[in-house]
């Protein structure tokens, strides 16, 4: 345990440390933050960083804790008790689902007593990792004893082993002089200790930035209307579940888009008994809520995010929507497996979603043995058309439309769809200028090769739908809702009568999220995350399908196409 005698030097430090000892963690963190900002020349500043980080960690603010520890370990390299900071930093990294960084940090510890503590904490977190992740980690950290022992335990607990795994287990036992122990399934993943006890009712916490203090009664719509749409959809879902004898206590919290507010909310000990967390809305809010969910083993679902990075931190995290990664994989699979179009020209815009979708699409095409002829990020505005022309310069007009048959040559055939029937174009952008430039370039070249786009193109005021309808276009519609479906019409009617507005996709997602995960809670308790992988895809109430058989985001990605002038689902 660290100790520093500063009583005679600074009363503020003593008071901040006293609050830490009294478990007033948020107050202690705030007090140490003041000291850190104003006392950089004090000889106890290292202790302020360390104890401030400890208070931040205890209050659920892992992000701030890591920031202070990184500053401490990088800028105060001569601090005698630096290895204590390495220990806490490694613990935080492991707790945040970053085992690579955690093992790297723990590797810097040399003091025997701290190494012993590090060994125990590493095993505590590593036993939550799936077997495939442990194998991957072992490639990079083959000398780590805690990792080697955990991997040996997991292999020893498998009902059957391949020849390679059997040899690996023998090597691990010999290398680390270790006798492996059986581990139960509940110890082998991030869902340990969730329990399978069924209850008469379940409590769902809704963490979203209502920002009530900024409401303008005269405004026709709130700035964050999507939050209210989600909330109303989930409330209607909870009422539907009550009719099925499933009681959901639905509790909303205004995060105010503020980490301090979130930490204050999460300080309530009663929230440790939540059965499910829904949210948050913004990436800045994610860290404290995710850390809280991990600490108390509470499943967490985001109704609308498509960010696959959220799934890297914990197996407790779910997405109602298919992530950009899943969209790229499933749609490229369709183009290759169903349409035999294994040569792709991929263009994408400047948003993170565009880049993530394009990268996933490219990687899967290559994994499937296909070819990516062009992979290009496009600038917006006036440069769009010239960028598209350069990217597609190899594609030539279809000679059957521009030349008489006797004038066909290998050269003028070029890379048209006629000479290369496997080619297709995928364009991922929400920028109307880029979308229109692509359509214009294809018209100029008289090309009608298969075109993959997102349904955002259908909402662009500048886009003439006929320009999409007339082409061989495949439209990714991640949250497709069939407005002709009776259940959809029923929900829309209820929602409109209640709110006097037509429901947005966020209202649909809120309703679907509550129904699906509320029923999962009722059937399996918080341990439902052990069950979803064994279930086949099933029809949603509003969404076409929900499928968690191979991932924690919805694995079903609807693809639409105009058929006789009507948008039609082609991969039901």
Image (spheres, grey):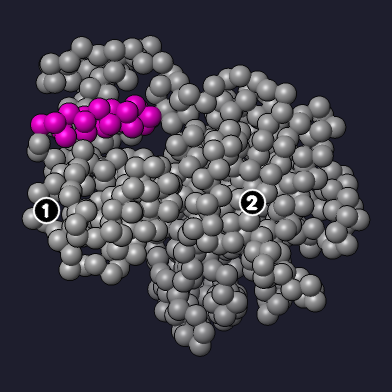
Residue 86 against residue 170 in the figure, above or below: below
Mark 1 burial class by Cα count in 10 Å: few <14, some 14-19, many 20+: few
Who's the residue at 8% across and 55% down the image? Answer: 78
Occupied quadrant, residue 139? top left
Of the two numbered discs 2 and 1 in the rendering, the one whose residue sits closer to the viewer? 1
Left or right position of 93 against 397: left
Q: Which mark is residue 79?
A: 1
Who's the residue at 40% across and 21% down the image? Answer: 187
The magenta region covers: 112-132
Q: Secondary structure at mark 1?
A: loop
Residue 163 placement (x, y as % from top left)? 26, 16
- 516 or 444, nearer to the observer: 516
Distance between the Cα atoms at labels 2 and 1?
42 Å
- 281 or 272, nearer to the observer: 272
Q: Which mark is residue 22?
A: none
Who's the residue at 48% across and 45% down the image? Answer: 290
Residue where numbered disc 2 is placed: 253
- Asked whether the viewer can see residue 569, the reply is no
Who's the residue at 54% across and 77% down the image? Answer: 434
- Asked whether the viewer can see residue 380, the reply is yes
The answer to whether residue 147 is magenta is no
Q: Main secondary structure of the magenta part?
A: helix
């Amino acid at each position: 345990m660290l100790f520093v005698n500063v009583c005679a030097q600074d009363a503020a430090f003593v008071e901040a440390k006293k609050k830490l000892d009294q478990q007033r963690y948020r107050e202690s963190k705030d007090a140490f933050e003041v000291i850190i900002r104003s006392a950089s020349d004090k000889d106890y500043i290292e202790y302020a960083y360390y104890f401030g980080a400890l208070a931040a960690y205890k209050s659920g603010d892992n992000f701030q804790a890591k920031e202070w520890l990184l500053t401490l370990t990088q800028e105060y390299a001569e601090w005698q008790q630096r290895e204590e900071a390495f220990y806490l930093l490694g613990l935080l990294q492991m707790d945040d689902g970053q085992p690579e960084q955690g093992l790297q940090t723990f590797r810097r510890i040399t003091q025997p007593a701290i190494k012993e503590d590090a060994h125990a904490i590493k095993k505590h977190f590593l036993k939550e990792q799936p077997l495939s992740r442990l194998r991957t980690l072992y490639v990079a950290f083959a000398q780590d004893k805690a990792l080697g022992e955990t991997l040996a335990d997991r292999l020893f607990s498998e009902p059957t082993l391949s020849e390679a795994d059997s040899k690996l287990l023998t090597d691990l036992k010999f290398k680390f002089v270790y006798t492996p122990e059986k581990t139960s399934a509940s110890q082998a993943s991030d869902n340990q200790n969730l329990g399978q006890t069924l209850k008469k009712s379940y409590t769902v916490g809704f963490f979203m930035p209502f920002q009530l203090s900024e409401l303008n009664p005269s405004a026709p719509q709130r700035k964050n209307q999507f939050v209210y749409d989600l909330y109303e959809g989930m409330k209607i879902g909870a009422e539907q579940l009550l009719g099925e004898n499933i009681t959901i206590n639905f509790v909303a919290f205004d995060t105010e888009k503020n980490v301090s507010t979130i930490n204050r909310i999460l300080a309530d000990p009663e929230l440790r008994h939540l059965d499910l967390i829904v949210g948050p809305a913004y990436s800045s809010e994610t860290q404290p809520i995710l850390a809280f969910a991990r600490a108390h083993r509470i499943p967490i679902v985001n109704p609308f995010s498509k960010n696959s990075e959220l799934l890297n931190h914990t197996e407790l995290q779910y997405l109602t929507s298919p992530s950009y990664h899943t969209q790229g994989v499933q749609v490229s699979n369709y183009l290759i497996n169903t349409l035999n179009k294994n040569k792709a020209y991929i263009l994408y815009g400047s948003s993170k979603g565009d880049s993530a979708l394009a990268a996933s699409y490219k990687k899967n095409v290559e994994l499937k043995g296909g070819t990516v002829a062009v992979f290009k990020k496009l600038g917006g505005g006036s440069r769009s058309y010239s960028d598209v022309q350069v990217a597609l310069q190899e594609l030539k007009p279809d000679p059957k439309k521009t030349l008489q048959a006797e004038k066909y040559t290998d050269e003028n055939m070029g890379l048209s769809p006629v000479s290369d029937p496997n080619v297709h174009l995928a364009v991922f952008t929400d920028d109307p200028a880029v979308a229109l430039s692509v359509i214009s370039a294809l018209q100029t070249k008289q090309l009608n090769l298969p075109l993959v786009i997102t349904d955002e193109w259908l909402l662009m005021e500048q886009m003439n739908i006929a320009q999409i309808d007339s082409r061989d276009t495949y439209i990714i519609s991640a949250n497709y809702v069939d407005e002709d479906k009776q259940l959809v019409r029923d929900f829309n009617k209820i929602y409109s009568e209640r709110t006097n507005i037509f429901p947005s996709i966020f209202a649909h997602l809120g309703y679907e999220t509550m129904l699906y995960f509320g029923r999962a809670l009722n059937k399996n308790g918080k341990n439902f995350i052990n069950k979803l992988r064994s279930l086949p895809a099933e029809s949603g109430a509003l969404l076409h399908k929900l499928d968690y058989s191979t991932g924690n985001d919805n694995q079903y990605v609807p693809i639409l196409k105009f058929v006789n002038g009507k948008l039609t689902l082609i991969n039901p």
